[in-house]
Amino acid sequence: MNMATGRNGTAKAAIAGLGITDLGKVYGRTASQFAAEAVRLAASDAGVPLGDVDGLLVSGGLNTSVGLGLQGELGLTNLKLLTQMQGYGSTAGQMVQYAAMAVQAGMADTIACVWADDPLKEDKGGGAAYRESASLPSGWQGLNASSSLYSANTFYALAARRHMERYGTTSEQLGAIAVAQREWAVRNPLAQFRTPLTMAEYHASRYIAEPFHLYDCCLVSNGGIAVIVTSAERAASLAQPAVGIYGWAQAHPGNTFERNDDFGLVSGAATAGPAALRMADLTLDEIDVVELYDCYTYTALVSLEDYGFCEKGEGGAFVSQPGVLGPNGSLKVNTGGGQLSSYYLWGMTPLSEGVIQARGHGGDRQVERHDRVLVSGNGGVLDHHSTLILGTV
């Protein structure tokens, strides 16, 4: 029997609550305070007393203050499950996976998964917040740093350049992703960027790390997001439409940047995607909505290839075709604007939008067909990957 869905294809675990704090340039609150607020909002959204939460999975971004002490800040006692997790951008997907397994095993009944961060400061830009958090490598690893290869921007730029050199991918094609996602963000009241973006504006924006322009790179945001995971049976009786967790998988490629490896050409989506679909007893053409981890336009492009929406190496040509991306496109990708235009809460960005779409709560951006949603998380520099298959129950 399929552990996730059972023989009759019904989910055994579900997301019952979603809590989203104020997002973006929100000052005066710590990451831990954002996390606590998000959990409270998620429990209220589900219609369950906070005291019913008997499992807590916690993660934060740059700020390590979000930890096991969140239990005390929330006043939770007698938890059956408590842990701090870090898989970078894949963490949100991983938390939901472990929560679903714990619910199915009877380890806990009502599990909150939360992620929060507060990198933005009133007197500093987002780039400065991330630069100051990074420690320069020492020893042999310092050889990369001496060549200015030490930040996520530079390593992902290297990955994108390799894809370009191997397959002929162009900046114009990457720009098509940025422009299309901004079209979605215009319809999203939570998005930080809600004005249309033209291709001319994309090309005119400054370089961050070639080949990446400003609009190839994700936002920086303060805030917190939490979800409540419980049994599908219980979720069906609660306040919101239950979002079933039908399939999941992880992949950790372990790239070492050695000569002849596939760094930049293949991501963990190539492994985690098919495995999650098998668990859900689905094929790719049965997916209605796709929420990708888009820390860069390139990351969205390579993920589309690796999930199988187009052939390897044809991602650039695929996304730049008229009628594929955007609200009027045939493939509904990053319907809230993604991390490029909406908000950057690591893997909680695609997860939260996936829940919103599956519930049918997307408002002006709601996709008509939303029975099955693929949610993707990417961590490190293509080091970690999580895939979830969510949907209506």
Image (cartoon, rainbow, N blue to C red):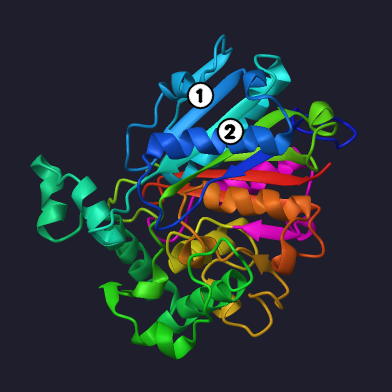
Asked which secondary structure carries label 2, the reply is helix
Q: Is residue 71 magenta?
A: no
Q: Which residue is mark 2?
A: 40
Whether residue 150 is situated above or below residue 331 in the rendered picture: above
30 up-or-down from 306: above or below? above
Q: Are marks 2 and 1 in contact (CB under 8 Å)?
A: yes
Q: Position of residue 103 (x, y in %)?
A: 69, 22
Determine the residue positioned at 88% across, 31% down.
7
Between 338 and 388, the one nearer to me in the picture: 338
In this rendering, would 119 be left or right of 9?
left
Q: Residue lying farthest bottom?
A: 200
Amino acid residing under circle 1 = Leu
Q: Disc 1 marks which residue?
A: 74
- Span highlighted in magenta in the image: 263-291
Is 283 within the magenta?
yes
- Specify the amino acid type for callout 2: Arg
Q: Which disc, if any, is residue 305? A: none
Q: Quadrant of residue 344?
A: bottom left
Instruction: Residue 389: name its quadrant.
Output: top right
In-image side of 247 versus 317 (left or right): right
Name the spot of residue 57 as percent of width and height, x first.
52, 27
> Quadrant where the C terminus lies?
top right
Question: How far apart are the two marked residues, 2 and 1, measured between alpha carbons?
Answer: 8 Å
* Residue 252 visible: no
Is residue 232 among the parts visible in the rendering?
yes
- Between residue 139 and residue 288, name the one nearer to us: 288
Residue 263 position within the rendered picture, expressed as x and y whole percent measured from the top left: 37, 55
Task: Assign a secondary structure to mark 1.
Answer: helix
Q: Residue at x 43, y 36 (%)?
A: 33
Most distant residue in the front direction: 28
The quadrant of the image that shows the N terminus is top right
Q: Residue furthest top?
A: 78
